[in-house]
Image (spheres, rainbow, N blue to C red):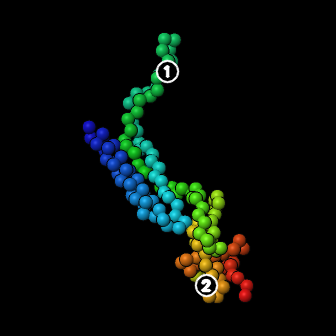
Amino acid sequence: MIRSMYSGISGMKGFQTKLDVVGNNIANVNTHGFKKGRVMFQDMVSQQVQGPMAATPNRGGVNSKQIGSGSMVGAIDTVHTGGGNQYTGRELDLAINGDGYFAVQIGDDTFYTRAGNIYFDNEGNVVNSSGAYLLGPDGNRLQIEP
């Protein structure tokens, strides 16, 4: 009886985590470059109560019997599939088809994003909406020549 309660409680805790991830996905549905998350569950320890039995001439084999101790969150993955492209009318708006990210730099730190709303600052640097510098394939800041 107590074992079944622990199994049910672990399932409820995992489901709460899944609801948190779904809520985060809904809250960010209109965020540029946001990638949804998904919860992956895994089995906790299980107890074998009967071993497997080999086949006989009159009967086929029987698998072992196990009682699980519940489930737990194995991982919260980010789903990196591409979204639908939309025409914005801006020549600087970019989209990534397939895998990959834009590399941007803030100070000495490099970050990666899939948000492609790009602008020019007053010095001719290519930046995103947060003011992070867009980096080219060579790792240097992109800049337009005057």
Residue nearest the observer in this picture, 61 or 14:
14
From this viewpoint, which residue is outermost toward the top?
Answer: 58
Q: Residue at x 69, y 81 (%)?
A: 143
Amino acid beneath label 1: Gly
Spot the residue most to the left: 1
Q: Is residue 6 left or right of residue 26?
A: left
Looking at this view, is 49 or 94 the one in front? Answer: 94
Secondary structure beneath dot 2 equals loop
* Screen quadrant of the N terminus: top left
The one of 133 and 111 positioned closer to us in this rendering: 133
Q: Quadrant of residue 126?
A: bottom right
Measured along the vertical axis of the image, is residue 16 above or below residue 145? above
Examine the rendering and report whether any part of residue 105 can be seen: no
**Residue type marked 2:** Asp
Number of the label disc, if any, that sits on residue 61 = 1
Label disc, if present, on residue 121 of the rendered structure = 2
**CA separation in Å, label 1 and label 2:** 72 Å
Q: Is residue 84 left or right of residue 48?
A: right
In the displayed structure, would residue 40 be above or below residue 69?
below
Q: Quadrant of the C terminus?
A: bottom right
Local packing at callout 2 (Cα closer than 10 Å; few below 14, some 14-19, many 20+) is few
Which percent across, then down, holds residue 42? Answer: 45, 46
Q: Position of residue 37 (x, y in %)?
A: 48, 57
Tell me the residue at 62%/73% (across/down). 90
